[in-house]
Amino acid sequence: MVEGRATAPSSGHPATARELSLLVARAQSGDRDALDQLLRSLQDPLYRHVLAIVRDSDIALDVLQDSLFTISRKLKTLRDSLWLKAWAYRIATRTAIRKSRSEKRWSETLRDDELASLENPEADDRFEPELLAVLPSLVDALPPASQVVLRMHYLESLTHTEIAEALEIALGTVKSRLAYGLDVLRKELANRNFRPSQYSASPDKTAPDTIPL
């Protein structure tokens, strides 16, 4: 367990795959400063992710604390640093679902094969830059599962494969949820006669300045 308090990240995240690999290696070898830096880099994105699942800030904080503790405790089992994000999100997702007040519903929703069975015409998940800028203010209107996938891909920059691994769902399901979510958003914006100047991105949801570990 990491002693002290982890502060919310601001800057200094690992910029390259090589830097991340070195940081993970240092943390796995027992470097406490490296471990703290690694946890700080994960803290805010994981908080946003679990908050989208549990929909309660107090529960989200509990989930975040448990997830960071598990990550720090099991980090030595991670064989490839390139999978750090997917691995950390998987831990956080499992913890969030377990603590969610709608655990059964979430488990079924994330694994629902209904969308995966829809025809997926090489899902066009490109998102126009002006729409991406307002995504945080609109994504809450999406069905929960599509919302989580869109947040992970567009706001947290996880790849399709990383999302599939993190949520433990099929790659086709990830692509279908993205395509479905984008289609819903585009139709909603068309109904509103969308103009970029109408919207401003919502402030990022970040974890509190300090999280006791």
Image: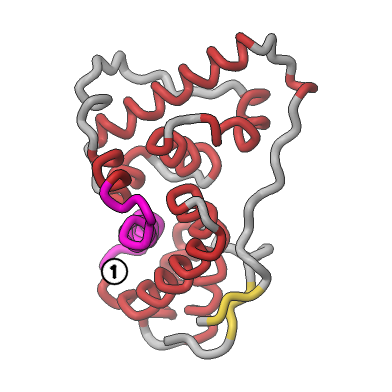
Q: Is residue 63 magenta?
A: no
Q: Which residues are magenta?
A: 79-104
Q: Residue furthest right?
A: 197
Residue 96 locus on image (x, y percent) = 38, 59
Residue under label 1, please give it. Answer: 78
Residue 39 locus on image (x, y percent) = 50, 71
Residue shown at the point (67%, 24%) measured from the top left:
130
Bin the neighbour count of mark 1 within 10 Å (Cα to Cα): few under 14, some 14-19, many 20 and up.
Answer: some
Residue shown at the point (61%, 29%) measured from the top left:
132
Q: In this rendering, is residue 32 above or below 95?
A: below
Q: In this rendering, is residue 155 above or below 211?
A: above
Quarter assignment of residue 97: bottom left
Q: Nearer the viewer, residue 178 or 101?
A: 101
Q: Nearer the viewer, residue 167 or 154?
A: 167
Residue shown at the point (46%, 17%) measured from the top left:
183
Please, what secondary structure does the residue beneath circle 1 have? Answer: loop
- Name which residue type carries label 1: Leu
Q: Is residue 86 magenta?
A: yes
Assign the N terminus to one quadrant of the image.
bottom left
